[in-house]
Image: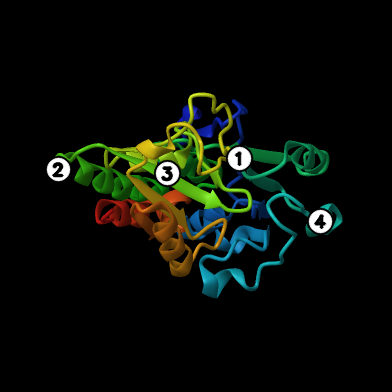
């Protein structure tokens, strides 16, 4: 196996992480659902000792791994008792004060923050290098590269302004600086936002200025569990297309991006 490139060992906040010893068996707690799935795809499932209740994939394998709470609210003492050597978190999904408390007794805290599908190359190599799963990480990188290439061959289409909804009561969407918006941009779809928006996940109302410029509303199946009924009701109310979309396929980074890009390439809105 090739030695790790030092640049592959730098996480999202610039911290350099050591490669585990050849004879080491890491004990990983992961607080990021999509990265829990990635760890299994890297062959590291046997190293997972804790996960959130939202870490549900791969379904047949995660059931035996202890739950330690949600992405925002974790059981600190339960995690302490698990004796982890590594903690994997995400800037958007986990609370910094909680991560700071965990860092007091977990030696290695790996911070992630993909903001574009292409950021998955670095994510695969970061975890692959730290945990000596480089060969599998490069296989995933190859698959990702092939999936990205299909967007180069898509026929040109008229730009669509889309409004991607992640929550209701209150209604919430995503900014153009998010992973989701940049996924949609691969199809030439531009995420709508107000001129005054300065949040990554802002709330909005249907009377907002400029919302009439939206061509299509996308209702995501997560984190809010939008259903077909919601899409039908909103279509009648707005009089414009409303499409129910698979939130995991469009928002989960990690290895899910490989299937997610295929889903996006064939998504008809």
Is residue 122 positioned above or below 235 on the image?
A: above
Q: Which mark is residue 153?
A: 2
Query: Which residue position holds label 4?
Result: 75
Q: Are marks 1 and 4 in contact (CB under 8 Å)?
A: no
Q: Position of residue 196 (x, y in %)?
A: 54, 24
Q: Report the number of discs.
A: 4
Q: Residue at x 48, y 64 (%)?
A: 230
* SS at mark 4 in the image: loop
Task: Give the number of the mark in front: 4 or 2.
Answer: 2
Is residue 199 positioned above or below 207 on the image?
A: above
- Distance CA(mark 3)–CA(mark 2): 25 Å
Is 267 on the left or on the right of 14, as rendered?
A: left
Q: Residue at x 69, y 40 (%)?
A: 108
How many C-alpha atoms fall within 10 Å of the one at disc 4: few (<14), some, or many (≥20)?
Answer: few
- Distance CA(mark 3)–CA(mark 4): 35 Å
* SS at mark 1 in the image: loop
Q: Which mark is residue 163?
A: 3
* SS at mark 3 in the image: strand
Query: Which residue position holds label 1?
Result: 92
Q: Are marks 4 and 2 in contact (CB under 8 Å)?
A: no
Is 259 on the left or on the right of 50, as rendered?
A: left
Q: Position of residue 266 (x, y in %)?
A: 24, 56
Instruction: Mark 3 or mark 2: name the one nearer the start of the chain.
Output: 2
- Distance CA(mark 1)–CA(mark 4): 19 Å
Instruction: Mark 4 or mark 2: name the one nearer the start of the chain.
Output: 4
Instruction: Mark 1 or mark 2: name the one nearer the start of the chain.
Output: 1
- Distance CA(mark 4)–CA(mark 2): 47 Å
Task: Give the number of the mark in front: 3 or 2.
Answer: 3
- Distance CA(mark 3)–CA(mark 1): 20 Å
Task: Give the number of the mark in front: 3 or 4.
Answer: 3
Task: Give the number of the mark in front: 1 or 4.
Answer: 1
């Amino acid at each position: 196996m090739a030695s790790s490139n030092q640049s592959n060992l730098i996480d999202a906040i610039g911290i350099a992480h050591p490669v585990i010893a050849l004879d080491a068996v890491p004990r990983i707690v992961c607080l990021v659902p999509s990265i829990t799935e990635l760890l299994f795809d890297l062959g590291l499932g046997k190293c997972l000792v804790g996960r959130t209740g939202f870490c549900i994939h791969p379904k047949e394998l995660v059931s035996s791994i202890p739950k330690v709470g949600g992405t925002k609210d974790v059981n600190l003492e339960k995690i302490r008792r698990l004796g982890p050597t590594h903690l994997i978190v995400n800037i958007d999904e986990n609370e910094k004060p909680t991560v700071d408390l965990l860092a007091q007794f977990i030696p290695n805290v790996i911070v992630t923050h993909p903001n574009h599908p292409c950021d998955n190359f670095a994510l695969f190599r970061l975890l692959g290098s730290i945990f000596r799963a480089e060969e599998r990480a490069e296989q995933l990188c190859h698959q990702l590269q092939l999936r990205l290439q299909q967007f180069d061959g898509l026929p040109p289409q008229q730009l669509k302004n889309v409004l991607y909804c992640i929550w209701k009561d209150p209604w919430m969407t995503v900014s153009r600086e998010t992973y989701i918006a940049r996924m949609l941009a691969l199809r030439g779809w531009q995420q709508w936002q107000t001129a005054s928006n300065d949040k990554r996940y802002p709330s909005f109302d249907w009377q907002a200025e400029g919302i009439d410029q939206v061509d299509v509303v996308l209702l995501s199946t997560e984190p809010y569990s939008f259903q077909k009924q919601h899409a039908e009701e909103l279509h009648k109310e707005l009089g414009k297309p409303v499409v129910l979309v698979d939130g995991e396929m469009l928002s989960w980074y990690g290895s899910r991006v490989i299937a997610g890009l295929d889903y996006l390439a064939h998504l008809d809105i």
